[in-house]
Image (spheres, helix red, strand yellow):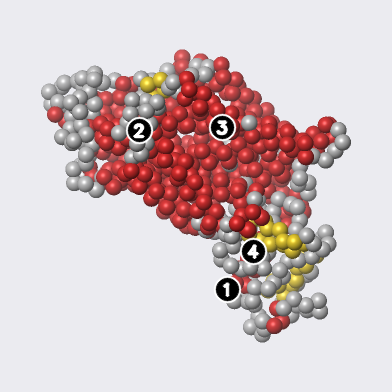
Amino acid sequence: VLFTMNGRIPPNLSSASLQRSPSFKAPAGIRTIQSTQYPRLPTELVDDDDFSSCSSFSGTLSESGTHYRPRREHWGNKLQFILACVGYCVGLGNIWRFPYFCYKSGGGAFLVPYFLILIICGIPLLYMELAIGQFTKRGPIGALAQLCPLFKGAGLSSVMVSFFISTYYNVIIAYCLYYFCTSFRSDTPWTECENRWNSKHCWEPSQFTSRNISRPDNSKTPAEEFYNRKVLQITSGIETFGLVRWELAACLFVAWIIVYFALWKSVRSSGRVLYFTATLPFVLVLAFLGRSLTLEGADAGLQYFFKPNWILLLDAKVWVNAAAQNFNSIGIAFGSVISFASYNRYGNQILVDAVAVSMINAVTSLIVGIFAFATIGNIAREHSKSVESVISDGPGLVFVLYPQAMAKMPFSNFWAILFFFMLLCLGLNSQFAIVEVVVTSIQDAFPNFIKRKLVCHEILVLVVCFVSFLLGLPNIMQGGIYFFQLMDHYIVSTSIVYIAFFEVLAIAWIYGTDRLSKVVQHMTGRYPSLYFRFCWLIAAPLLILCVVVFSIVDYEPPTYNNGTYKYPVWSQILGWSITAMILLCIPVVALYAIFKAEGNTICEKLLSTITPRVDDVSTANSIADIGNELQEVKTTLMDAKVPPNITVKGRDQRIEIMKR
């Protein structure tokens, strides 16, 4: 491979001189690297006989034929990586889950376990996942396989969780798209009771505010009826699925098209999109915060939000909810953070990234909480109800309460358009990350198959998006919201905590905090502090174990519409079956790894499965640097239109670097 001193091909270097020849000598200003055999290390040398822009794989020639490894792209710059992480963390969950958990968990009292778990688990585990992703240059499956093959199944479970979430998370984006398009109508349909879908129980608050009449108990607001009777056309329960809502199906299809074109070129395309989708929502959130604080009754909602009910801190469910919100919001054990970090340069300063992303997410959650409870206080005042009786669970908080607040603002259509566009951006940012981890993991696990059958990265992304679209259709049937809530309960609130425990066990206990600390020091030049090592080794696993035990002892079956609908037993069995299918990956893959491991006895095989596949950090760093240079030179050669017949090839076990 030819490297120029200044990154350009000398003008006197002809195409013929680039032909491979045993007697070829590099001209002045050129250095050569001769590599033999693809190293089994956490990073790959990027080399390819085919410079096709479609190809996302690199080929290495060996005695047995051609083997392909996925080519690892890099973020265009550090800002793209930060925006990707922030965009993933600050999603729709901050808009509806965080306020609802605050309501269920004693208002301000919920902030105590939330920030405590953030400090003990959230930031340290985010730091840990960024480290292993950046070091191994793999997705969650490949990263854990490199560090602790015995628990490779934890990475597979993370990918399965992300895949299941991708099938129903885009449904919320489809709702946002539907509301966004509807907001362009001159008369927004969720403000009055004169539409064909309204029932006799429809009640318009604006008609009774001047008479100080409280809302009847069996009444429904126009926003509620629009959401339930027009958008969802909801059935009586999960037992009755009904028909497909074709309007929502069209919105879901459009949402998947947006996701595809944002990811089809990997981080090269999604990184550019994030400049817009990850920054605009913060501007809009601040605008809505300022507007909500001026609403009548906002003080009552804020008082409920900040006034803690300390007795609820003794409830284990509050701590489970705080852990679930932390893991779901920051992305712990979902695999997306590991995948994002795998596209970093080897020496990226991950501690700064971990603290910055965590703090931005926490501050945004507080801002959204203030905005939400100020809005809820205004609606409670208008309905002459208490704050507790106004809040709804699930997506209804977004699509019922917030539109009511938008309708009372001057230029209500303008505010509604901005609000649902903000939700679109927040949802898409998270969806990009969720789908990216699935694509990255498949590409890492089956490179030969994908290269032969799918040819390029773009087709792989298309297949993943299309399959997820089909699996998401049950969620947009007339009874689909019940299925959505069931999946969200068992996958996000239940499975993630278990996966996080095994992930910490594999990395902190088996791979070891000492090894991990040396890896971090070699990448960043900074040895992790005693605080982080203590959290990795003791505090985080102990806290997660307590949450797991409490979640089992204090188990509550899922409900819908603030507990008015209780799921039948068969649906709970279905939910636990999905959870079991996800979590069984951990023991099944562990048993398979032991069975395939080298050794004559069980102890020898077990010892082999807990032995890292990466031992030499300095060698890994050297390979990473060479891989980065090869990628840059490949781009230079493509720009110079040099014949694509340069390869990295060999038969030895070493890499020789000749001085310039």
**Which residue is depicted at the point 37% across and 28% down?**
240
Q: Where residue 113 sits: x, y (%)? A: 51, 25
Disc 2 secondary structure class: loop
Residue occupied by mark 4 = 631
Q: Amino acid at mark 1?
A: Asp
Q: Is residue 19 above or below residue 349?
A: below
Residue 448 found in image quarter: bottom right
From the viewer's perspective, tell me whether residue 80 is left or right of residue 256. Answer: right
Query: Where residue 639 is drawn, which disc sits there?
Result: 1
Please state which of residues 489 and 400 is positioned toward the viewer in this rendering.
Answer: 489
From the viewer's perspective, tell me whether residue 634 is left or right of residue 397. Answer: right
Query: Where residue 242 is drawn, which disc sits there?
Result: 2
Query: Do callouts 3 and 2 mark residues in contact (Cβ within 8 Å)?
Result: no
From the viewer's perspective, tell me whether residue 67 is left or right of residue 437. Answer: right
The disc, 3 or 4, on the residue closer to the chain's N-terminal end is: 3
Residue occupied by mark 3 = 496
Q: Where residue 403 sits: x, y (%)? A: 28, 37
The disc, 1 or 2, on the residue closer to the chain's N-terminal end is: 2
The disc, 4 or 2, on the residue closer to the chain's N-terminal end is: 2
Q: Tell me the CA gap for discs 4 and 1.
A: 13 Å
- Closer to the camera: disc 3 or disc 4? 3
Q: Amino acid at mark 4?
A: Gln
User: Is residue 337 among the parts visible in the rendering?
Assistant: yes
Q: Tell me the CA gap for discs 4 and 2.
A: 53 Å
Residue 97 found in image quarter: top left
Q: Residues within 10 Å of mark 1 (few under 14, many from 20)?
A: few
Q: Where residue 12 sits: x, y (%)? A: 66, 85
- Closer to the camera: disc 1 or disc 2? 2
Q: Tell me the CA gap for discs 3 and 4.
A: 36 Å
